[in-house]
Structures are given as C-alpha cells and as structure tokens.
Image (cartoon, grey):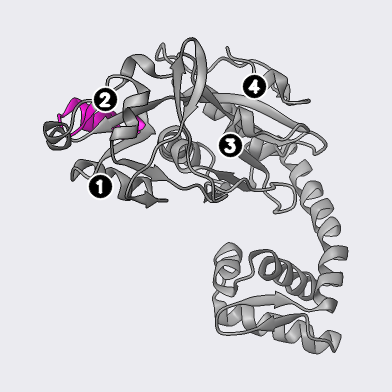
C-alpha cells in the first residue's frame, strides 16, 4: 500500500469513528481543510461517496460502512505490528487512547499525567472524559477507567483508587432547614440530583442496618455537571451527594458542611483501569499502568502495590467488598 493511499484510508477511519471532521483532524494533527481534501481525493479515486456530510453531522454511506468494516481489522494489525517494535526502543512510543469518568480524570490520572508525559516524551495520550459506559473495543480505546461494579466480564482490571461520597450543604442552607440526622430525613430536603449520561440518576447510598442501601431523594435541580452542582450547593440551593474529593477543600474551608457522615457506606467503590483480555497489551499502555501504580497514592500515602491484574470473569471478584 502506497503512503498516500494509507494516509487517505487512515483519515477516512478517523472521520468515520468520530463522526466529526474537526475532532478527526485534531486526532490526526492536520487542519480540517486538509482532512476534507484528503477525503474528497479518496472518494474521487474510488469513484464512490463514503460519507454524507451536513453542516452539523457526518454519516457513513453504505459503501463507507462496508469499507470501514474491512479496514478496521487491517489498521488494528498495523498498529499492533508497529507497537511490537517498541520493545526494541530505549523508551516506549505511540498513542494511548483512554476513556474515564470525571472523578478519576481529575483526582487520579490528572495529577500523574504531567510526570508521565515528561518521562515518556514519545508517548501521546488521548483522554475522553465522560460518564457514559463506553464500549472500549467498539470505539477503539486502548483502556478505560471505571468502577468495578460496572466492568464487563471479559476485561483485565487493575485497581487504581477508591471512590467515597459525602452529603454536603452550605451553612446558610442548614441555618434555614433542620439538619438531617438520618437518611430518611432527606425526604424533607431539597436534594440536588446528578443525571448520568445513561439517563439514570446518581444513586444516594447509605449504610442502613449494615446494608449498602439506596435512598430515593427529590429536589428542584437536576444537573449533569459536578462544577455546576458544586456552585448550586454553595449558593444554598440544597443538599448534594458528591465524591469526597470534590468537596473536601470546601468542607475544610467552611464553605460546605458535611452531614450524615456516620451513615455513609463503610466500604468504598473502587476504580479500575481495564483493557480487553484478548488484546496484546500495548507497550505504551504498560508504561502508563506501571507509572500510575508508582505515583497514585493510597490511603497510606504510598504508591499502589504492583499486584497482578485480575480478570473480571463474571464480575463477582470485582464486586466483592474489600
């Protein structure tokens, strides 16, 4: 395959997978105009339209879908072949694509990433931050980060950190409303609810009579932005159920007050980095995993232990409370 043809086909796959010329151009490190011209030249050379374009969207034609279906395995094999050469380099190289929710992006990976990129200048990292349960195989991510109870059964999983929650309110809100003493008291309060990308609400879970129990709450504000919700709770709109990392500074500085602390689940959820068990682990991904293990701090202020990865299997191992 000549270089020009490979570049055209690679450009086509980038647009097809992202459904957007601007995002694909950013991924390929070329301008949208150059990418558009490349796709036009490919379609002219093949004599068939591959993409239907409008001002707002890009969609595959039937011919485009068929071409993508045949190309993707070829490009995957090509990328694997190139990555295999990395074992002979002094330092790993290549692109790593990872998807993760906002909390681990901000509090686990974010603080470690500058040091990783400095240590491995030949590695590029693309991170997609979303609350969606992304299929990393179908969307061609190398790995993802997700809570253990949400992992698919055929993934290799490595524990990265814990997720604990707190219920908080502004001092002004509590000055005008009775402080909740039990989870049942939340029925008398305005609760700010967080809607996930799936459409479901983030559950409010508490330890009630030794059981991890979800409590239904109601409120006048529904939001899908943690930053927006944090602003609203500080302004006295109501109570918020949020990851501890997002509110600990505000609690320490008196902008928020934690309530129902004794009712929170005793055992936290755990975040895992996961990747397909049937895929050879890219050298660059292994470097990132090793780096995160060495730098992410556990509760004792030490790096995470270098325990072997575990296979999710039927999910019971990862759901078991540690």
Q: Which residue is mark 2?
A: 180
| Whether residue 57 is situated above or below residue 166 in the rendered picture | below
Decide which of tag 1 and tag 2 comes sooner along the chain: 2
Q: Which mark is residue 319?
A: 4
Labels 1, 3: front one: 1
Q: CA distance from mark 1 to mark 4?
A: 33 Å
Q: Which residue is mark 1?
A: 232
Q: Main secondary structure of the magenta part?
A: helix
Left or right? Give the position of 22 relative to 224: right
Left or right? Give the position of 41 relative to 222: right
Q: CA distance from mark 2 to mark 3?
A: 34 Å
Labels 2, 3: front one: 2
Q: What crowding class fits label 2: few (fewer than 14 Cα within 10 Å), some (14-19), or many (20 or more)?
A: some
Residue at left 17%, top 33%? 177
Secondary structure beneath label 4: helix
Query: Which stretch did the figure color magenta?
Result: 245-257
Q: Position of residue 299 (x, y in %)?
A: 42, 14
Decide which of tag 2 and tag 4 comes sooner along the chain: 2
Q: Which residue is mark 3?
A: 145
Left or right? Give the position of 39 relative to 102: right
Left or right? Give the position of 288 relative to 193: right
């Amino acid at each position: 395959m000549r270089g020009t043809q490979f570049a055209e086909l690679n450009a086509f796959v980038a647009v097809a997978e992202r459904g957007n010329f601007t995002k694909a151009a950013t991924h390929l490190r070329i301008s949208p105009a150059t990418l558009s011209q490349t796709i036009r030249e490919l379609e002219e050379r093949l004599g068939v339209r591959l993409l239907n374009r409008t001002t707002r969207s890009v969609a595959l034609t039937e011919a485009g879908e068929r071409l993508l279906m045949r190309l993707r395995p070829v490009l995957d094999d090509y990328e694997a072949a190139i990555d295999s050469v990395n074992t002979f380099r002094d330092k790993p190289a290549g692109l790593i694509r990872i998807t993760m929710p906002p909390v681990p992006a901000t509090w686990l990976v974010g603080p470690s990433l500058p040091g990783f990129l400095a240590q491995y200048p030949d590695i590029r990292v693309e991170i997609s931050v979303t609350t969606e349960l992304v299929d990393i195989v179908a969307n061609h991510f190398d790995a993802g980060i997700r809570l253990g109870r949400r992992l698919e059964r055929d993934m290799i999983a490595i524990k990265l950190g814990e997720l604990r929650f707190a219920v908080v309110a502004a001092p002004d809100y509590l000055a005008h409303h009775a402080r909740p003493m039990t989870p049942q008291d939340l029925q008398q309060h305005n609760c700010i609810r967080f809607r996930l990308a799936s459409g479901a609400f983030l559950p409010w879970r508490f330890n009630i009579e030794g059981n991890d129990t979800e409590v239904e709450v109601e409120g006048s504000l529904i939001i899908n932005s943690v930053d927006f919700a944090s602003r609203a709770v500080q302004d006295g709109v109501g109570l918020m159920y949020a990851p501890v990392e997002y509110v600990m500074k505000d609690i320490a500085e008196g902008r928020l007050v934690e309530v129902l602390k004794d009712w929170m689940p005793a055992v936290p959820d755990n975040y895992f980095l996961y990747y397909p068990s049937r895929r050879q682990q890219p050298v660059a991904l292994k470097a990132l995993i090793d780096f995160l293990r060495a730098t992410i701090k556990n509760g004792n202020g030490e790096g995470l232990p270098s325990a072997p990865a575990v296979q999710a299997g039927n999910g019971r191992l990862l759901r078991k409370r540690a």
